[in-house]
Image: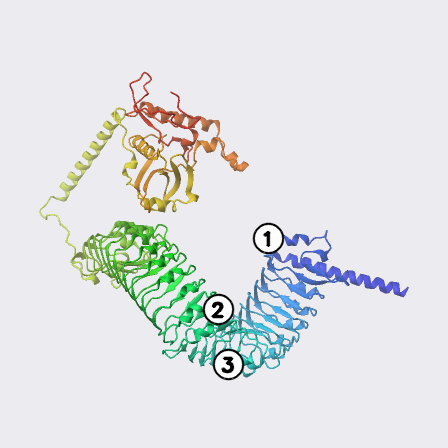
Amino acid sequence: MHAFVLNSCLSLALTGSNETDRLTLLEIKARITSDPFGVMTSWNETIQFCHWHGVTCGHRHKRITKLELKSLKLAGSISPHVGNLSFLRVINLQNNSFSHEIPQDIGRLRRLQQLVLQNNSLSGQIPSNLSGCSKLIYFALGFNFLVGSIPKELGTLSKLRLISIHENHLTGSIPHSFGNLSSLETISATSNNLNGSIPDIFGPLTNFSFLGLDMNDISGMLPPSFLNLSSLTSFGATSNRLQGTLPSNLGTAFPSLQAFSIGHNQFRGPIPVSISNASNLVYLGIGTNQLHGEVPSLKNLYKLERLVLGSNHLGSGRIGDLCFLCDLTNATSLQLLEINVNNFGGTLPQCLANLSSSLVIFSAAYNKIVGSLPNGVENLPNLESLWLSSNQFSGHIPPEIGKLPKLYELGIDMNSLSGDVPSSIGNLSRLTELYLEKNNLQGSIPSSFGECHNLMILSLRGNNFSGIIPPELFRPLSSYLELDLSQNHLTGFFPKEVGNLINIENLDVSQNMLFGEIPASIGSCVRIEYLEMQENLFQGTIPSALGSLKGIEKLSLARNNLSGVIPEFLEHFKFLQSLNLSYNNLEGVVPIKGVFKNATATSVGGNSKLCGGIPEFHLPKCKFPHSNKGGLSLTLKLIISLVCGLSGVTFALAFLYLCCLRREKKEPTPSDSENFPNMSYQSLLKATDGFSFANLIGMGSFGSVYKGVFEQGETTVAIKVLNLVHPGASKSFTAECEALKNIRHRNLVKILSVCSSTDYRGYDFKALIYEFMINGSLEEWLHPSQTSNETNERSRSLTFSQRLNIAIDVSMALDYLHHHCQIPIVHCDLKPSNVLLNNDMVGHVGDFGLARFLNETSENGLDNHSSSLGIKGTIGYTPSR
């Protein structure tokens, strides 16, 4: 009897405990505000809670032991009720968007072994009572927004192996209590605001292998006990304020060392010779310190993949400084080699060509290296970045440099290189940055540069280049952001193809001998911020097209032969901070607004015919013609003005009346499109985003139709580009121009302009520009695409009234063409796809590519004037004869 009562009580207690776990899970669920994957839907009454997503229960007591909801994009806060899950061993909520503070109640979970909350948006401080989790092994809170200091109470967690608190906003120093954590293996605390020195606590930590303190504010020297970490595999402390010398036994103290990174500190002295004994090193990063002396032998570092020695005082500036590079031929996996900004002298050894074929980056810039550029670089096929700038290299650029297929950065500027630039550089199709400035290079600029389709920065400044600027440099849809051709001996006209540089931000052609007018096409470079063209022989006026460069910050046209007035648009440039128009032949009034209000930002001196402006310019006052003092009285002037005004109004009304009387007898007035200038190929290219597929709205037998948007006025148009390969395309273009140039009717598609030019390859290019019909063609409304959904099909249906009105619109257009033109016109290809609808669903007849002019001599009045054999029009819509 007693046993039965005892078992019943135990069963009730167990049921009650399980119910606590279930209710706790529901409290946790209630705090989740976003569940994009719907994982919380399984947390319901129809499923036993041990089978809910992310929940694991023990086999014996059916109590929750694991709560794992990682990488589910969950958002909300962590419920403090989680502290009621007394059997919990694992909490893993990493890679979500949980916010607010870490609940103090987690400190009650005495069985907890893993607390993994990294990569969330948690804030507040680390709870000090987490020390109550006495069995905690893994403690991962990285990538959050935690503040405050690291609780010293964590030093009581004797089983703790991993502390991961990187990428937070923690302050203070590393607690000395961490020296009590005899099981500790890893501290990852990079990217915080920790300060103080590295504590001398590492003696008892025999299993410690990883210390990451990069990007903090830690100062002082490496503590003596640091050298006792014989199991150390990785030490990172870049971007701190550490100082002192590197231990002489660095390479022997850490036989398992794989990564040693102390860059951007204040270490001084030599590199220890013992470093060669660290044969497991994969990454050695000691750049940006104050190290000096020779680089010791590195021949035993077989596993080395990255070596960073840059920005120190290494080397003596003499021959032999770079012998250590030959030791690196043993490092068959070497990918990164940086020795830049040091004091290395001598020549680059030929063994450089025998370095690992895996080498990706080699930088030796800003040293004192002499001799010629190394041969055999083609043996480094994976090289992506080569920097040899600011040395004392001489001789020619080896053509083999064009055999590096993956090269995207090449810097050999600020040397003493001479000769022509090899055209093989044009083979570097991935090249994005090319710096050749400040050498003695000569000859012409290779046109093959135009083959470097990804080139964003090209600097040729300060050489002896001569000849013209090759137009190939300005290929369409260029990627250039910066182009510097200044301080050379370039001559000829500035290529109009410069308008293709639609992404250019910095363009400098100053201090050359370029002549002719500044090309108006430069106005297409709407993203330009710095434009420098001073000290050339440019003439003519400042083109009005520059008015589109609204984001420009610096404009220099000084010391040329420019004439005419200063354009008014310059005073409206909001971002213009520096303007130099000095020493030209400009005349007229100097504006007084915008940049012209600042005499230190604007220079207009050396233009003898300028006047006005702010007093600081010290220019003469402008002389305007004044009326004679003995002239007409004010009253008489008013009378004359009124009489003239009334006469003008009367004349205008009479003129309009006569025009109305003669309207039926006269030929229709020319279309407004005659006021539109012929469009250039570049403007159409820009308006259609390079004739992109996204802007393609139709295709026909003679060409394709694109939607285009002109920036000035934000006008949307339809652009019909003729396919001149088709034998009838040119005839279609001529027919359509002839048919439309003298007709105008509300139900005919209006032609706005034409383009007859050449494209960037020199091929003939013809296009017609029409007003854009927003509702497409009648074909699309009568026969919707099968890919359209039901809603779209219903919205595309026409009412009977709309169909009738469109039919009337088409008949009105045909009546006008047949009976009211000076010469009757037959369309010859009337079909629904050639009937376009505007915003008000008014029908417009278009596509006159097959139209014919007729003489009114036959019985039906529509005898063919220029007959041709064969069927005209589209099958199914062929006009009856």
Q: Earlier in the sequence, mark 3 or mark 2?
A: 3
The local secondary structure at tag 1 comes to loop
Q: Which residue type carries mark 1?
A: Pro
How many residues crowd around disc 1 within 10 Å: few (fewer than 14), some, or many (20 or more)?
A: few
Residue at the disc numbered 3: 274
Q: Looking at the image, which is closer to me, 442 or 538? A: 442
Tell me the amino acid under the disc marked 2.
Leu
Q: CA distance from mark 3 to mark 2?
A: 20 Å
Q: Residues within 10 Å of mark 2 (few under 14, many from 20)?
A: many
Corner quadrant of residue 120: bottom right
Q: Quadrant of the N terminus?
A: bottom right
Task: State whether residue 761 is above or below residue 769.
Answer: below
Q: Position of residue 38 (x, y in %)?
A: 63, 52
Q: Which quarter of the figure has residue 463?
A: bottom left
Badge 3: residue crowd in 10 Å (few <14, some 14–19, many ≥20): some
| Mark nearer the N terminus (3 vs 1) | 1
Q: Which mark is residue 36?
A: 1
Residue indicated by mark 2: 334
**Which residue occupies 14% across, 53% down?**
623
Q: Is residue 649 left or right of residue 127?
A: left
Under circle 3, the secondary element is: helix
In percent of the image, x 77 and y 61: which residue is there? 16
Residue 144 placed where, x, y %?
55, 65
Q: Is residue 244 visible?
A: yes
Q: Residue furthest right?
A: 1
Residue 174 in the image: state x and y as whole percent.
56, 76
Q: Looking at this rendering, what residue extends furthest in the top direction?
A: 859
Q: Quadrant of the C terminus?
A: top left
Q: Position of residue 297 (x, y in %)?
A: 47, 78
Identify which residue is drawn at 18% across, 58% down. 607
Q: Is residue 196 visible?
A: no
